[in-house]
Amino acid sequence: MYLNNLYNVTGRFGRDPELQTRPEGSVSNFSIAVDTGKDKDGNNKDPMWVDCYCWHKKAELIGEWFKKGDLIHIIGPIEQRSYINKDSVKVDKWRVEVKEFSFVPRNKSADDLNKE
């Protein structure tokens, strides 16, 4: 268990999950948009985008059952990756390795679930 590094959030798929088969097993990559609430004028703020991935059976289930716009609740450790982009600038990227996930009923919003 990841007691000191556990990310627990609900969001919407920004695109269909990408499922790949690799020698070490199936992997699914996807991004979810997490609601960040409203500004002082009552307008929706831009969502926070969270990059996610998972392996094996979880990857296959997510690839089969979810699509762009669907809500998902995820739990897993967050990690940092660094790379040099095409302009030779170091980029730091955060992503979550999904260890647990759950389907979210369509009649609830991500904002309602993140408040629970």
Image: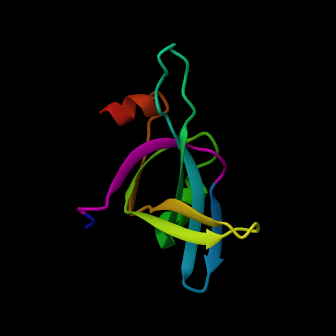
Residue 17 percent across, percent down from the top left: 62, 56
Front residue (pair 89, 111): 89
Q: Is residue 107 above or below residue 73?
A: above
Q: Classify 24 as above or below 13.
A: below
Magenta range is 3-16
Q: Quadrant of residue 27?
A: bottom right
Q: How many marks?
A: 0
As for residue 38 lying within the magenta part, the answer is no
Position in image of residue 46 (x %, y %): 57, 33
Q: On the rendered image, what quadrant is the N terminus found in?
A: bottom left
The residue most toward the right is 86
Residue plotted at (60% across, 64% down) = 91
Q: Position of residue 18 (x, y in %)?
A: 65, 61
Task: Judge whether 106 appears above or below 1 on screen.
Answer: above
- Which residue: 47% across, 33% down? 36
Q: Position of residue 35 (x, y in %)?
A: 49, 34
Res 86 quadrant in image: bottom right
Between 110 and 105, the residue placed more toward the observer is 110
Q: Is residue 115 left or right of residue 32?
A: left
